[in-house]
Image: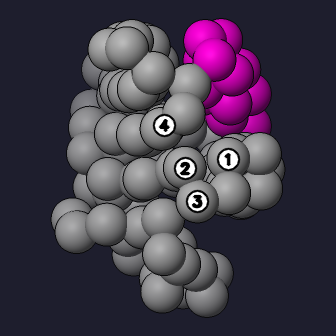
Amino acid sequence: MDQGAPPPAFSATAEVDGDRLRVVVIGEVDMATADTMFQTALREPAAQVTLDLRGVTFFDSAAIHALVRLAQRFPGMLSVLPSRQVRRVLEVAGLGEQDWLHGA
């Protein structure tokens, strides 16, 4: 492991298409960045919200908490596209069978 390498960059961007919102998250989602992911998903009103986590490399308990809060905020309107790492974390947490979780 290279101790001098910079940490992976985090970003959460919102893309609006009519009444659909797509939030694309890249990098590590942890206690320092989970609220940014959450707030980005709330930034625009939407009838359908897609949380694209395919570029996420790390997902901790703060990230899980933010995701569960989004699922509660958008019942039946949230779709989550996980990376392999995110899917594994959600499976370990007992959330692997949620209807908002889609193929990796």
Instruction: Tell me whether circle 3 and circle 1 mark residues in contact (CB < 8 Å).
Output: yes
User: What colouring method underlies this structural image?
Assistant: one colour
Residue 55 position in % (x across, y down): 26, 38
Query: Is residue 36 found inside the magenta-colored segment of the image?
Result: yes
Name the residue rendered at 41%, 60% in the picture. Answer: 86
Classify mark 3: helix, strand or loop. loop
Instruction: Tell me whether circle 2 and circle 4 mark residues in contact (CB < 8 Å).
Output: yes
Residue 53 position in % (x across, y down): 36, 43
Circle 1 packing at 10 Å, graded few (<14), some (14-19), many (20+), is some
Query: Which three-letter amino acid code belongs to the residue tagged 2?
Result: Met
Label disc, if present, on residue 77 of the rendered structure: 2
> In this rendering, does residue 75 appear at all?
yes
Residue corresponding to mark 4: 49
Residue corresponding to mark 1: 74
N-term-proximal mark, 2 vs 4? 4
Circle 2 packing at 10 Å, graded few (<14), some (14-19), many (20+), is some
When the figure is inspected, residue 37 is found, relative to residue 43, above or below; the finding is below
Instruction: Tell me whether circle 2 and circle 1 mark residues in contact (CB < 8 Å).
Output: yes
Residue 72 position in % (x across, y down): 77, 56
Instruction: Tell me whether circle 4 and circle 3 mark residues in contact (CB < 8 Å).
Output: no
Circle 4 packing at 10 Å, graded few (<14), some (14-19), many (20+), is many
- The region drawn magenta spans 31-45
Q: Main secondary structure of the magenta part?
A: helix
N-term-proximal mark, 4 vs 1? 4
Name the residue rendered at 43%, 53% in the picture. Answer: 79
